[in-house]
């Protein structure tokens, strides 16, 4: 069922922007690359300045310890959103296990998590998760700012950010038993706004192109995969934003082909709870008729979990697409 070939995703260097001297010309040239990649692939790979091997080692080392904790401890991990807290031993996804931390760049949030998992505390891990998440957040904000600027929506950007929440997911995939499927995570498009993924030591992530072909994503310890999720393409909260279908949203999945436990990390940007998402009027014109009716994200997730998507490829379209 799986693909053999690797996809050549665009690799975009964000470390050049961290330099105080980075000028508008550098910003604009990265912006052009970003927008092109998100239209064509819905994703790209990015380098992040200051994401040192030591920091990565510390965070992945902590994950290894975390997933070895007893079930009773792991299941204390609860998040505000469904499926963001501890998930494990699902009959549909037996290889998959995950934990989540809401707003993981806020030290107190991470400390609450580490204190639950290690009652004696774990200040070093807490600090490192926080630093790691801040770096991912910086990348998330830069990419979205570039998208908004590319669509002449800069005046909407602060409003968009204020209405975004984040969760860091720590994920583990065990090795399949000899008679078990190698499916780690079924094919899906992320439902939130944007996701940044990182796979560490064992590859497994696969991405579908616009031409419906599946490709593997090569393991690159220093590259982070930035991916558009359904709600960005559609919406942006309160009276607005969104891109009314301007970007590509990639389907992806995880297959565990190696006989090695796989760890991955993802920072998921999501709409804050309780807001109505609507297409921005700026994004709707004769050439781009309205594609989506206003919707509430959490109601949409309930719809999705209720299995009512039907034949529609994209869940948001099934939920609130405007029928032509
Ligand atoms: O583990 C991965 O690399 C991908 C995870 C993923 O796609 C998700 O959690 O939505
Ligand atoms: Fe995903």
Image (cartoon, grey):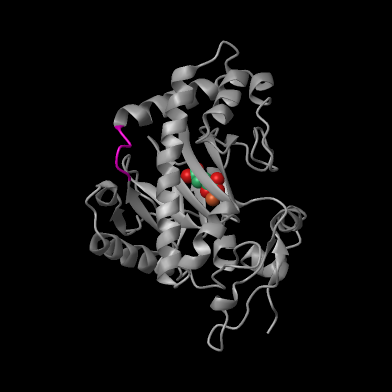
> Considering depth in this image, is 157 or 46 the residue closer to the camera?
157
> Considering depth in this image, is 11 or 140 the residue closer to the camera?
140
Q: In the figure, 226 relative to 285: above or below?
A: above
| Start-end of magenta stretch | 48-52
Among the 4 quarters of the image, the one containing residue 4: bottom left
Residue drawn where x is 62% and y is 71% of the image: 279
Which quarter of the figure is the C terminus placed in? bottom right
> Considering depth in this image, is 49 or 45 the residue closer to the camera?
49
Q: In the figure, 9 relative to 289: above or below?
A: above
Residue drawn where x is 57% and y is 67% of the image: 241
Residue drawn where x is 58% and y is 34% of the image: 101
Residue 203 in view in this figure: no
Helix, strand or loop: magenta stretch: loop
Residue 35 in view in this figure: yes
How many labels were placed on the picture? 0
Q: Position of residue 119 (x, y in %)?
A: 60, 13
Which residue appears farthest toward the top when viewing the image? 120
Q: In the figure, 118 relative to 224: above or below?
A: above
Asked whether, in this view, residue 35 is left or right of residue 298, the answer is left
Residue drawn where x is 43% and y is 60% of the image: 145
Q: Does the magenta stretch include residue 51?
A: yes
Q: Position of residue 29 (x, y in %)?
A: 27, 65
Asked whether, in this view, residue 57 is left or right of residue 180, the answer is left
Q: Position of residue 48 (x, y in %)?
A: 32, 44
Q: In the figure, 74 relative to 310: above or below?
A: above
Q: Is residue 242 magenta?
A: no
């Amino acid at each position: 069922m799986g693909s053999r070939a690797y996809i050549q995703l665009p690799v975009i260097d964000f470390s050049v922007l961290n330099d105080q001297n980075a000028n508008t010309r550098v910003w604009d040239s990265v912006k052009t690359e970003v927008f092109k990649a998100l239209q064509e692939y819905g994703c790209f790979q990015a380098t992040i300045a200051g994401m040192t091997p030591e920091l990565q080692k510390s965070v992945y080392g902590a994950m290894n310890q975390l997933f070895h904790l007893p079930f009773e401890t792991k299941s204390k991990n609860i998040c505000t959103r469904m499926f963001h807290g501890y998930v494990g031993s699902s009959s549909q996804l037996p290889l998959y296990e995950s934990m989540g931390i809401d707003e993981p760049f806020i030290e107190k949030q991470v400390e609450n998590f580490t204190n639950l998992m290690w009652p004696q505390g774990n200040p070093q891990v807490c600090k490192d998760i926080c630093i790691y998440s801040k770096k991912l957040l910086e990348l998330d904000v830069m990419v979205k700012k570039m998208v908004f600027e590319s669509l002449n929506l800069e005046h909407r950007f602060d409003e968009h950010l204020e209405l975004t929440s984040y969760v860091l997911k720590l994920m583990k995939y065990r090795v399949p038993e000899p008679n078990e499927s190698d499916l780690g995570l079924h094919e899906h498009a992320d439902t939130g706004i944007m996701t940044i993924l990182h796979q560490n030591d064992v590859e497994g992530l696969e991405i579908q192109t616009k031409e419906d072909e599946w490709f593997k994503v090569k393991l690159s310890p220093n590259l982070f995969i930035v991916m558009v999720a359904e709600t960005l393409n559609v919406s942006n909260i309160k009276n607005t934003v969104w891109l009314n279908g301007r970007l590509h949203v990639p389907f992806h999945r995880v297959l565990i082909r190696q006989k090695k436990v796989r760890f991955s990390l993802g920072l998921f940007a999501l709409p804050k709870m309780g807001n109505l998402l609507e297409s921005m009027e700026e994004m709707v014109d004769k050439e781009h008729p309205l594609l989506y009716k206003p919707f509430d994200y959490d109601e949409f997730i309930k719809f999705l979990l209720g299995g009512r998507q039907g034949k529609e490829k994209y869940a948001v379209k099934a939920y609130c697409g405007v029928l032509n």
